[in-house]
Image (spheres, grey):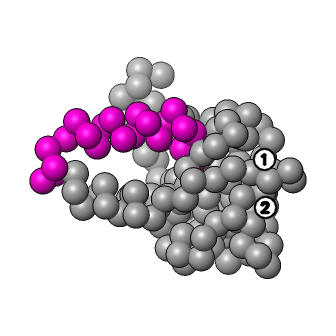
Amino acid sequence: MTGQYQHSIDAKGRLFIPAKLREELGQTFYVTIALTDHCLTVYSEEGWEKLTEQFDSLPYTKSRTAARLIYANAAKCEPDAQGRILLPQKLRDYAELKKDVVVVGVSKRAEIWDAEKWASLENAELESGDLAAIAEALGI
């Protein structure tokens, strides 16, 4: 998945998922907390199954905390006729989503960010110099 899309959460807590991402995510997908950032992560059904396999392959003592948080806070989503999903209040609170959000394609998943937090993070990462080190590690 690629690109970034600016949208707004409506008064009922619904968010429009861009058609391009809906095509890649499929009819049913999962939204849950991100463990490393205060955003939401969106997985296709296939991606969700792979994540489950990864958790299942770890010893319980290593995966239990993260698995509990990921699965307890997950929402199974099916977009309505207008391409909107309902984001549960608990997930909106976790990611500090207010009205304006950015949906970002990140390879095999998408992320949902508060627009101000995303702009700040994107600017900081673009200016950090880390991209050169990553490019070198990738052999680019």
Mark 1 vs 2, N-terminal side: 2
Q: Which element type, helix, strand or loop, lies under badge 2?
A: strand
The amino acid marked with disc number 2 is His
Magenta residue check for 52: yes
Horizontal side of residue 126 vs 82, given as left or right: left
Measuring 64% from the left and 43% from the top, which residue is drawn there? 28
Q: Is residue 62 left or right of residue 21?
A: left
Q: Quadrant of residue 117?
A: bottom right
**Numbered label attached to residue 113:** none
- Residue labelled with disc 1: 18
Residue 131 at what x, y percent from top left? 48, 41
Relative to 70, is 94 on the left or the right?
right
Q: Residue at coordinates 39% horizontally, 58% vertically from top-left?
A: 70
- In the rendered image, which quarter contains the N terminus? top right
Q: CA distance from mark 1 to mark 2?
A: 9 Å
What residue sits right under mark 2 in the picture?
Answer: 7
Q: Is residue 64 above or below residue 12?
A: above
Asked whether the beta carbons under mark 1 and mark 2 sit within 8 Å of each other, the answer is: yes
Which residues lie in the magenta part?
Answer: 42-62
Three-letter amino acid code at disc 1?
Pro
Task: State the predominant SS element of the stretch in magenta.
Answer: helix
> Residue at (41%, 34%) from the top-left corner?
50
Tell how many labels.
2
Front residue of 29/130: it is 29
In the rendered image, residue 109, in percent from the top left (x then y), is placed at 55, 41
Q: Secondary structure at mark 1?
A: loop
Tell me where residue 68 sits by quadrant.
bottom left
Viewed as shown, does residue 80 lie left or right of 140? right
Q: Position of residue 127 (x, y in %)?
A: 53, 54
Image position, residue 73 (x, y; %): 45, 64
